[in-house]
Structure formats: structure tokens, C-alpha cells
Image: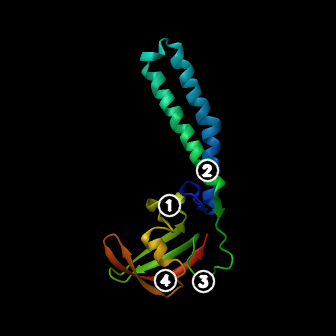
């Protein structure tokens, strides 16, 4: 498998979100930018028309996003969490205790394309995500992160 054909791990929620985004780009955004281009052409000489250039750049950006999403969806594998009860896997929501700071954090482990740290969705390829995969409630592990080592204990695991 080439790097370009890398498998995209998705939760059911992530798959639906990606399909909805693709549909919006194809049906709404394409039409909007086509209309902007049409209007810009009506202004006359397109060789010095910044509206036309902006619209063409936006069109290229939208088409690039469409191609990227289509490739990810072609290579998508929806995570099946059946049979993984009791251990951390992609799709798990995990409550962790940092044994060094005594602070609790709750994370959902997702595929890279769904990760959003601001919403506590971390990638299965991130240091913590990768480090806790396969762990069970009550287990502790020391994990290397960019700022050093962190000791984490799994307090709870649930499925979405």
C-alpha cells in the first residue's frame, strides 16, 4: 500500500461527518464558486481581474478537498469495536489519571483524520493514543510524549 493509499480509520460518526462534508463540497460549494467565476467573467478582462483569480483559487482548493475526501473514503475502514470490550481501542472513550499530576482527562481514541484535540479526540497514532491501545481498566503505563515521560492509569473505558 502506497503512502497515498493509507487506510483511513474512522468511527461511524466520523464516516458520516466526512460523507456529509463531501456532499456539501460537491453540491453547494462547487455551485457557489462557479457562480462567483461567472460573475467575475462578466466584469470583463479576466487577465487583471482579482475577483476571477480569487474564485479560481477557491475552486482549485475545493476540488483538492473533494479529491482528498474521496480518497480517504475509498480507503476508509470503519472501526468495529465488537469483541474489544474491556480494552482501549479506536472508538473507545477513556478516562485517564496522570499519576504525576493527579489530574484526570477523558479522551476518545479516533483515527488520524478525525482527531481534534480541542474536543478531546486524539489519534490512535499520537503518543498517548498509541501508548494506551490495548490497555485495560486499572492498568498503568509510562508513555513517552514530546515533553518527556508521563505515567498514566486507565480509570474507565467506554464505547460510543
Residue 8 location in percent, x, y?
Answer: 59, 60
Q: Position of residue 158 (x, y in %)?
A: 58, 76
Crowdedness near tag 1: few (<14), some (14–19) or many (≥20) residues, C-alpha within 10 Å? many
- What element does badge 3 sit on? loop
Write down the residue under mark 4: 155
As drawn, 112 above or below 50: below
Crowd band around label 3 with a 10 angstrom C-alpha radius: few (<14), some (14–19), many (20+): some
Q: Earlier in the sequence, mark 4 or mark 1?
A: 1
Element carrying mark 4: strand
What's the CA distance linking mark 3 and mark 2?
A: 33 Å
Instruction: Say the numbered circle drawn on residue 86.
Output: 3
Of labels 3 and 4, the one closer to you: 3
Is residue 34 shown above or below 122?
Answer: above
Q: Mark 4 packing: few (<14 Cα in 10 Å), some, or many (20+)?
A: some
Residue at 54 percent across and 38 percent down: it is 62
The quarter of the picture where the C terminus appears is bottom right
Query: Percent from the top left, x then y, of residue 12?
Result: 65, 62
The residue that mark 1 highlights is 115
Q: Alpha-carbon neighbours of circle 2 within 10 Å: few (<14), some, or many (≥20)? A: some
Q: Give the mark nearer the N terminus: 3 vs 1.
A: 3
Say which residue label 2 marks: 71
Residue occupying image coordinates x 51% and y 75%: 94
Amino acid at each position: 500500500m502506497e503512502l497515498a493509499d493509507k487506510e483511513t480509520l474512522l468511527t461511524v460518526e466520523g464516516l458520516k461527518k466526512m460523507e456529509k462534508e463531501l456532499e456539501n463540497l460537491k453540491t453547494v460549494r462547487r455551485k457557489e464558486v462557479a457562480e462567483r467565476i461567472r460573475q467575475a467573467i462578466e466584469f470583463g478582462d479576466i487577465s487583471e481581474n482579482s475577483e476571477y483569480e480569487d474564485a479560481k483559487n477557491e475552486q482549485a482548493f475545493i476540488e483538492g478537498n473533494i479529491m482528498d475526501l474521496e480518497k480517504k473514503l475509498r480507503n476508509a475502514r470503519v472501526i468495529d469495536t465488537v469483541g474489544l470490550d474491556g480494552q482501549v481501542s479506536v472508538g473507545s472513550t477513556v478516562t485517564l489519571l496522570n499519576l504525576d499530576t493527579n489530574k484526570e482527562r477523558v479522551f476518545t481514541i479516533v483515527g488520524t483524520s478525525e482527531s481534534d484535540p480541542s474536543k478531546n479526540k486524539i489519534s490512535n497514532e499520537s503518543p498517548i493514543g498509541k501508548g494506551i491501545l490495548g490497555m485495560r481498566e486499572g492498568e498503568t503505563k509510562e508513555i513517552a510524549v514530546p515533553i518527556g515521560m508521563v505515567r498514566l492509569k486507565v480509570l474507565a473505558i467506554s464505547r460510543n
